[in-house]
Amino acid sequence: MKQDGDLTQVYLMPGMAANPSIFGNVRFPENLFEVHHLEWEMPEPNESLQVYAKRMAKLVKHKNAVLIGVSFGGVVVQEMAKFLDLKRLIIISSVKCSDELPPRMKIVGKTRLFRLIPTSLVEYVDYFEKVAIGDFLKKRARLYKQYISITDKQYLDWAIENMVKWKCDKPDEKIIHIHGDKDEVFPVKNIKDAIIVKGGTHIMIINRFRWFNEHLPELILTGRMKKNKEKKQIN
């Protein structure tokens, strides 16, 4: 059995405004991995994404660790990686360069229309849950309330702006990118060089957790998939 010092250290970064509970059903063999959950720090006024990422990188206490980020968290871990010595960098339901952003986000970023998004409305999620009509809306409201923990307008304004205005012309070739072919936020047609999960949506870390339980350990340890047809070599 591996001692604590021999375990692979895994740090998990949730998506925008989300809490670590999105990883609640993802399991890592305890004899191989030690898992650490990262949480969003509040950004300083006008803080750049690079400065924020450097601050977040200080929360990673191990060398040769594995950093996994979901959605906007995937963007943040890529910036964090510039200040860290990592064993593996994995992004899920995210983008690894500006070219992979959908056209609507690029337009919003260039025209600064993101400033018109009413981020303060998230404060009314409790009310929305009470008045939602139909099982689908009620389920969505409950999911939102369960996994979204940050409703601070300053954070949300900052996060949205840095997502749509993120600049990265050349992604790290060693990134492992896992993406669903039904992702409605970052459509797969804009994504290159990724491991595609059939039927996976933007929240597949929650509702397709069995896929991650089956494949993530092997991806972390070897950088490749078990199945030849889905194999992607990571140097």
Image (tube, rainbow, N blue to C red):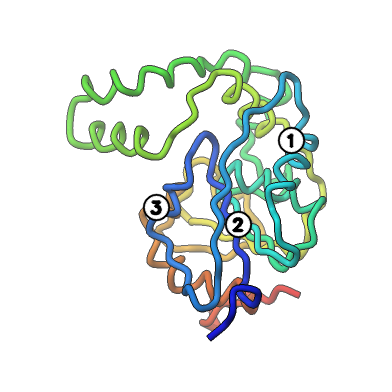
Of mark 3 and mark 1, the one earlier in the sequence is 1
Q: Hey, what amino acid is under mark 1?
A: Tyr
Q: Which residue is mark 2?
A: 11
Q: Which residue is mark 1?
A: 52
**In terms of secondary structure, where does tag 3 sit?**
helix
Question: How dense is the environment of label 2, judged by Cα within 10 Å: few (below 14), some, or many (20 and up)?
Answer: many
Q: Nearer the viewer, mark 3 or mark 2?
A: 2
**In terms of secondary structure, where does tag 2 sit?**
strand
Name the residue: 60% across, 44% down. 73
Q: CA distance from mark 2 to mark 1?
A: 17 Å
Q: CA distance from mark 3 to mark 2?
A: 17 Å
**Residue 35's x, y, as percent?**
54, 61
Farthest left residue in view:
134
Location of residue 67 by image quarter:
bottom right
Q: Which residue is mark 3?
A: 206
Farthest bottom residue in view:
1
Picture quarter with the C terminus: bottom right
Q: Are marks 2 and 1 in contact (CB under 8 Å)?
A: no
Question: How dense is the environment of label 3, judged by Cα within 10 Å: few (below 14), some, or many (20 and up)?
Answer: some
